[in-house]
Amino acid sequence: MKYEIKGISTNVKKNNISQLDDHYCNYIDNNNLSPDQINKVKQLLIINHQRQVKLEERQPVSKDVIDKAKNNCSLIIETKTLLKIYELYLQNKITSDDIFNMFLKDGLLEF
């Protein structure tokens, strides 16, 4: 998996997805991967957006951004979602296989 973690003051933008795609392409170019290996690389954008706004007051990620992520086969994971998943994992309520399968989706990880 290739990933990028960002903390930004604004909401998630299409530009963040484009930056992730650039990182993905650079990773592919710099690692001489076979087609089978390329298919195993997943684009993850783990992001803490609107970080100066209380969690309950943050605007949702826009449909346009989610659609761009889907078109790029990317997955946006908000840090609040990632922390909730981790909490459930520590409580043995979900398994690492469950988490792996969640990360195979495209768009916005909703939990």
Image: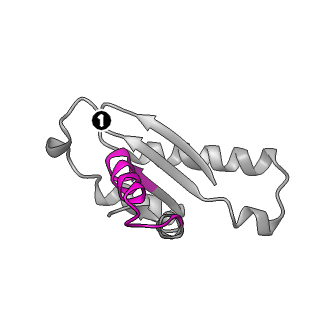
Element type at mark 1: loop
Q: Is residue 44 left or right of residue 67?
A: right
- Density class for disc 1 (Cα within 10 Å; few <14, some 14-19, many ≥20) is some
Position of residue 40 measured from the top left corner of the image (x, y, whole percent):
69, 64
Q: Nearer the viewer, residue 88 or 27?
A: 88
Query: Which residue is found at the position 20% from the left and 34% from the top?
Result: 53
Q: Nearer the viewer, residue 97 or 71?
A: 97
* Magenta span includes 75: no
Which residues lie in the magenta part?
76-96
Q: Is residue 52 above or below residue 18?
A: above
* Residue that sits furthest to the left in the current view: 57
Q: Is residue 49 above or below residue 68?
A: above
Position of residue 41 measured from the top left corner of the image (x, y, whole percent):
67, 59
Q: Amino acid at mark 1?
A: Thr
Query: Which residue is found at the position 47% from the left and 58% from the top?
Result: 75
Question: In this figure, which residue is indicated by the disc labeled 1?
Answer: 10
* Magenta span includes 88: yes
